[in-house]
Amino acid sequence: MGSEDPLTRAFAHVLPTNKAKSPVLQRDYQVLICDGIVGLASADGAQKPGGLGSSSLDARRTFCHPSRYLTGKPLEKKSISGRNYCGAGLQGGGLKRKLLLQPELREALARLSQHRPRDEKLGKRLSRADFGGLLDCLSHDDPRVVKRFGPEEAEGPLSKDGRRRLLVEQQTMVLDCNRAVFELLTGIQADFERRGLSLDLWDHWVGEWTELLYSLGAHDSDEALIGPGALHVVRKLLLGGEATLEDRRDLAREAPILRRILDSYGGLTFPAFFTCTLYHLYLIALLARGPTGFEAGGRRGWVHEAIDPFERAVDLFAEARRRPLSIEERRHLDEARGLANELLPGVERLEASPQQWERMSGHERSLLKERLGRDEQGDELHPLPAGHAFRAEQDALACYPFPGWEQKRGLPWYM
């Protein structure tokens, strides 16, 4: 890059000035320009447009990667715990941060919303056939089946037989989430019919559901739909309660899209057909904050102990909408609801109660402290001292001085 290049002049205060004497500095120079510090190239995270995303070289979460190893082998991409999914499971499994994982379904849902009608990619309306294909794929028994909608192709390379790879232990989760969205869309149709509105969602405004459907389709992750301060309100509504004035205020601050939907249905409860989708969104938002949970010695971790009764209660409420519950079932419902309301607040706030803390394993306690940025005694961690060897190494590798602030991250190496 010549000295007259405007990017070189713009970065003159951070670029090395003696590049000819050191090939290492020359590599650093190239990284600075393409590293995405000011949005020149890739974006952070595997799901954002423009970035290669997470990879097996991402131990320090670098922003740029070469496409191949020195041997010519392509760089392998993989999901990273805490960024692409929450709550590590066996063989890399875990709860994903998106309700819908298949990119072609997300794109179809965003197009259905018509929230950005002028968008080049997502502004084109679905046809009747596209909408039927969307419902068919959402209700399909095999979540690995790839479905294309119109001329737009799904993101990334697809196998020749139209099936994508998916971990066995994740297939049930994906199937449940797909069917939750299917129930939402068919429920909106039935509700519109009851209200005398058009059933042709692909050809008309989808009303109060516009923002939610767009967010489920176009955004990188779904946990932002429910902020931490609104988790208790969503739990209350899922467990059969009604929103108070203060609850609605919390939703307005932490989950404004849900608040607008709630208001359009009377301001007290959400419609029944939204329950399944809301349940999954609650779990995504809950686990995305970083709680930990393990199974050891025949006992499940504190997070699972809190979620299990909540799941049982939600299932029993769903059953109660189909038929009257027996006396025994109502007793189980009351027990599960009471236990969920006792245990989940600690998980929502990442503040375990004394009883929960006592039942935790030592491994759970240490990991929870680490996730919260605390040391073994529970005190807040402080920056490493200036003379610390690890800090000196990181400062040398990944410190970009800008006027008034510093941006630190690991750097890739190009050969």
Image: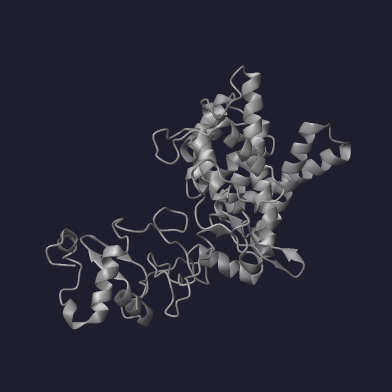
- Front-lying residue, 275 or 373: 275
Q: Where 29 falls versus 47 (above or below)?
A: below
Question: Outermost residue toward the right?
Answer: 327
Q: Left or right: where does residue 278 sit relative to residue 309?
A: left
Across and down, in percent, residue 33 comes to 26, 64
Quadrant assignment for the C terminus: bottom left
**Residue at the image point whose x is 79% and y is 32% from the top:** 322
Residue 325, position in %: x, y?
84, 35
Q: Can you name the residue that lies furthest to the top here?
A: 196
**Is residue 389 found left or right of 306 in the rendered image?**
left
Which quadrant holds residue 130?
A: top right
State which quadrant residue 18 falls in.
bottom left
Above or below 276: residue 174: below
The structure residue drawn at horizontal position 54% and vertical position 45%, both measured from the top left corner, is 106
Residue 145 appears at what percent x and percent y? 64, 51
Q: Quadrant of residue 57?
A: bottom left
Eyeballing the image, is 169 above or below 257?
below
Give coordinates of residue 41: x percent, y percent. Answer: 32, 58
Residue at image x 61%, y 66%?
Answer: 92
Horizontally, residue 90 falls left or right of residue 11, namely right
> Is there any visible trace of residue 212 in the rendered image?
no
Relative horizontal placement of residue 91, taking residue 257 as reference (left or right): right
Q: Nearer the viewer, residue 152 or 374?
A: 152
Who's the residue at 38% across and 79% down the image?
Answer: 390
Camera sees residue 51: yes
